[in-house]
């Protein structure tokens, strides 16, 4: 077996293990959510059974329902009530500038493979490649006009300033914990992204 074949076999094994871990984690989360929803359903059934359907209580319940829909609030929590809150993984921002559509596509595929192996963050990819097709790529894509396009349309404003403002805004909006600048001459490999 050559070194390349062994590296590929290791990579495929790591990717399969990542997919399996991802599916197991999803199954555990689905079971936890199902149990929480069952408990909430049972509490609501008991509450509905206690509700008297006389004219005054019916009107009060209707007023509460309309107020809840407008305010988006729940009634005061009863004993044992705990809302289900999902923990979202941290966001990493990847800045991919100067690559053509094929280069951006290859990077996104590598990034998706990395997330299959270790789904420890949510990726946001900022690119200046206008020809990269929009759609569901498993990552959030943000577009920034390339330098030449920007200078053609807005020569009065520096492209570096726009880039800096956009990076600041994306970091703030997504509450990013890490920013990676992708070298267009040598995009990272899966092994490098896993470090």
Image (spheres, rainbow, N blue to C red):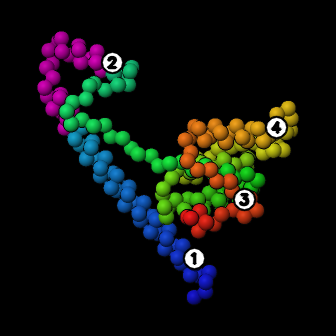
Classify mark 4: residues with Cα within 10 Å, few (<14), some (14-19) or many (20+). few
| Residue found farthest to the top | 56
Residue name at image x 34 percent, y 18 percent: 67
Check disc 3 and report its element: helix, strand or loop: loop
Q: How far apart are marks 3 and 2 (CA)?
A: 54 Å
74 lies left or right of 54: right
Q: Secondary structure beneath disc 2?
A: helix
Task: Check disc 4 and report the residue beneath it.
Answer: 158
Q: Is residue 107 rendered magenta in the image?
A: no
Q: Mark 1 points at which residue?
A: 8
* Dot 1 or dot 4, earlier in sequence: 1
Q: Which of marks 2 and 1 is nearer the N terminus?
A: 1
Q: How far apart are marks 4 and 3 (CA)?
A: 22 Å
Mark 1 secondary-structure assignment: helix
Residue placed most toward the observer, 59 or 128: 128
> Distance of mark 1 from mark 3, alpha carbons?
23 Å
Q: Quadrant of the N terminus?
A: bottom right
Task: Tell me which secondary structure the magenta stretch mostly adopts.
Answer: helix
Which circle's residue, 4 or 3, is located before the other in the chain? 4
* Other-residue count near label 2 (Cα within 10 Å), few / some / many at <14 / 14–19 / ≥20: few
Marks 1 and 4: which is nearer the front?
4
**Segment tinted magenta in the rendering:** 41-67
User: Residue drawn at (27%, 42%), measured in percent from left and top?
Assistant: 37
- Residue hosting label 2: 66
Using the image, tell me which numbered label, if any, was put on residue 183.
Answer: 3
x and y percentages locating residue 123 in the rendered image: 56, 51
Residue 58, percent across and down? 20, 16
Say which element carries label 4: loop
Earlier-in-chain disc, 3 versus 2: 2
């Amino acid at each position: 077996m050559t070194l390349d074949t062994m590296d590929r076999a290791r990579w495929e094994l790591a990717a399969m293990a990542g997919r399996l871990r991802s599916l197991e984690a999803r199954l555990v989360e689905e079971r936890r959510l199902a149990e929480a929803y069952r408990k909430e359903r049972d509490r609501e059934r008991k509450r509905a059974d206690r509700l008297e359907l006389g004219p005054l209580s019916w009107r009060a319940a209707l007023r509460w329902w309309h107020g809840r829909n407008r305010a988006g609030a729940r009634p005061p929590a009863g004993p044992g009530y705990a809302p289900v809150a999902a923990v979202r993984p941290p966001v990493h921002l990847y800045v991919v500038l100067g690559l053509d559509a094929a280069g951006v596509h290859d990077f996104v595929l590598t990034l998706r493979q990395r997330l299959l192996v270790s789904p420890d963050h949510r990726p946001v990819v900022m690119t200046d490649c206008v020809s990269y097709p929009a759609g569901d790529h498993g990552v959030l894509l943000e577009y920034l006009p390339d330098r030449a396009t920007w200078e053609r349309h807005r020569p009065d404003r520096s492209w570096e300033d726009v880039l800096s403002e956009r990076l600041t805004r994306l970091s703030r909006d997504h509450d990013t914990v890490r920013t990676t600048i992708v070298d267009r001459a040598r995009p990272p490999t899966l092994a490098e992204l896993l470090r």
